[in-house]
Image: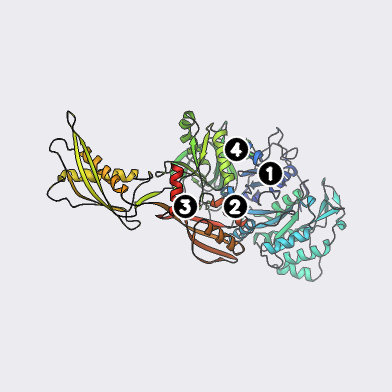
Amino acid sequence: MPDRSTARAGQAPTVADPRHLRNVVLIGCSGVGKTTLAESLALAAGAVNRPGRIADGNTVSDHEDIEHQQQRSVQLSLLPLEWNGIKVNLLDPPGHPDFAADLRAALHTADGAVFVVSATEPITAPTRALWRQCAAESIPRAIAVAKLDVARSSFEDILTACHDAFGLGPDTLRPLFLPVHQGDRPTGTVDLLTGRGYGEAGQEVDAGQAPGAGPARESLVEAISGQDDTLMERYLAGETLDTDALEAGLRREVLACALHPALPTTDSGIGAAELLDLITTAFPDPTERTRPGPDCDPDAPLAAQVVRVTSDAYVGRVSLLRIYAGTLHPDTHIHLTGPEHSGDHQEGDERVTGLTSPFGKLQRPVPHALAGDLVSAAKLTSARSGDTVHEPGHPVKLDGWTLPEPLLPIAVEAHSKADDDKLSQALNRLTAEDPALRLEQNPDTHQLVLWCTGEAHAEVVLDRLRGRHGVHVDTVEPRVALRETFGTAAAGHGRLVKQSGGHGQYAICELEVEPLPAGSGFEFQEHVVGGAVPKHFIPSVEKGVRAQLAKGVSTGHPLVDVRVTLTDGKAHSVDSSDSAFQAAAALALRDAAEHAVIRLLEPVAAVSVLLPDDYLGAVLGDLSARRGRVLGTETGGPGLTLLRAEVPELELARYPVDLRSLTHGTAEFSRAYLRHEPMPAALAARLADNDG
């Protein structure tokens, strides 16, 4: 590997050639030590002058107070580092599944991935799923084993666990470095390509302190040489292969996703420099990106994409951009196009003012950003995550990424009149910044509902409302859109007679109401004989019935699936009016309800759950407890089951949280409104008592 070199803390690294760039995402679930590793990399590269801190005391990756409260990252961090003349854009997304939107954006943006696995924790199913996703997209990968200084497991045992968890074939996972121990504590590493050992402070150590280094080197060299006939012939002939040839072979195998190198790291920083060496020598530069997109040419027309949008207390909206082609300069006019699949697909022209390189809370000015790089632009008022950015007159379309569907409803109410005045604007800003947040003004329940990806996401959204926008809200129980219907046929009489001086009101209606099949809606008929109700008042009767249907007749929920027939009535030549017959019709409908069985209808959702076979029994039992009806199961992939069911929406309020707990975060589900159907009488009575 190359000699170690660092940049001065506080400077924003710049490059003049896309081949001197590396865009790498760190992948790992919460608690594996991913952010600690990112901070170690920043320290090793000289981007910070003490662990986790930049020269002025700002933190490397924490952005918000809630990150300290939750003890985890809640949004994507970018750490631009410089190592041996190469700029490394290190993307550190949150590991918690509630913030998968940032992870998917980072995966889409990066050209290579480092999977961080903990020596103290098993490899989780979501991590295995992300490995499969990277494999499907041919993203080069390496493995960093973290927390070796606090674990009892050996490095070799953890690599065996990775081999099994990721379903890797022979020779595809090989250690590139081995740990050197003093007692039970790792004190350095040995580079299997060069045979050199590195200690905690960068000093060389005796490579002989790493047991098994010889066989491990032979295995690594065989894996590197296997696809290169020339190298293999030299190796089989007993020739000593030079480091340059081995490094070139390693890079070829990594880019082809045929070899995934692994190395040990510790919380004290051992392995950080070695990982930077690996990234800069073996990972792809933007010109070698295999996924669809324009050629990485700095002289081509601009083609870029918005990776994320955040708010800064002093600057306002800040958009992080990945430049795929061209070079972006300040004071440039651009055109933004929203993803076609988004619900608010929009276009707009903007002007880029200044460009900055983000590093933790800092925004460091840069003169330009060329193809392959990542840069921040302030005050792009219409920019949203996933938007394509291009020059006016040079349209381009860049593929976006799939966002997680927010399935946890959080109903909120403004805490005060002052909060209510600011709430709408604050929520609009939050939804613009957070693509995983969906805002709904429910027309049936009249509640303001924030659809989140989980409880941690909801907590962050509410904290941002308070902290960033000064808006306080109260959370309330989300309601579902219940309905009423007639369970039996009935007749009703409505009489409105007021003739005490002046112009009076007079209308009498006789109605018959009968239930219709579910989903039929409302039908109105008239069988009036002899003009008892004048023709021009019949529409008034229907209008009055419809108004009462919307209000309901028993529990205050809309009345559906009935046929109402006007059979008789009376009118007065002077005192009858449109409003009088509307009122009489409403009275007649309510009177009919007094003589009928009124049933409460609840919405039912079609639910699909994709889960590992191991958890099928637990999920089936849970759905049964939720009054769910399982329609069937089918194979959803190797070791996976796709389960389809119908579940009352009343039972789904916390289902995302409970399903995650039941399946240890391994299941995915979707829901869609299906129909309304009668609620069990006991439950309907209990709800009526609670409403009362």
Of the 4 image quadrants, the one containing the N terminus is bottom right
Q: Residue at x 87, y 54 (%)?
A: 206
Q: Residues within 10 Å of mark 4 (few under 14, many from 20)?
A: many
On the image, the x and y values in percent for residue 85 come to: 70, 46
Q: Is tag 3's residue or tag 2's residue first in the polypeptide sequence?
A: 2
In-image side of 406 versus 532 (left or right): right
Mark 1 lies on residue: 81
In-image side of 338 versus 227 (left or right): left
Whole-Å distance between the Cαs marked 1 and 2? 19 Å
Q: Mark 4 touching mark 2, by CB under 8 A? A: no
Q: Is tag 1's residue or tag 4's residue first in the polypeptide sequence?
A: 1
Q: Is tag 1's residue or tag 2's residue first in the polypeptide sequence?
A: 1
Whole-Å distance between the Cαs marked 1 and 4? 14 Å
Q: Residue furthest front?
A: 595
Q: Mark 3 touching mark 1, by CB under 8 A? A: no
Label 3 vs label 2, nearer the camera? 3
Q: Which mark is residue 649?
A: 3
On the image, the x and y values in percent for residue 208 come to: 87, 58
Label 3 vs label 1, nearer the camera? 3
* The quadrant where residue 503 appears: top left
Instruction: Give the residue type that dot 1 points to.
Output: Leu
Q: Is tag 4's residue or tag 2's residue first in the polypeptide sequence?
A: 2
Q: Residues within 10 Å of mark 1 (few under 14, many from 20)?
A: many
Q: Which mark is residue 356?
A: 4
Give the answer, above or below, for where 408 lies relative to 614: above
Whole-Å distance between the Cαs marked 4 and 2? 22 Å
Who is closer to the viewer here, 318 or 34?
34
Whole-Å distance between the Cαs marked 3 and 1? 49 Å
Of the 4 image quadrants, the one containing the C terminus is top left
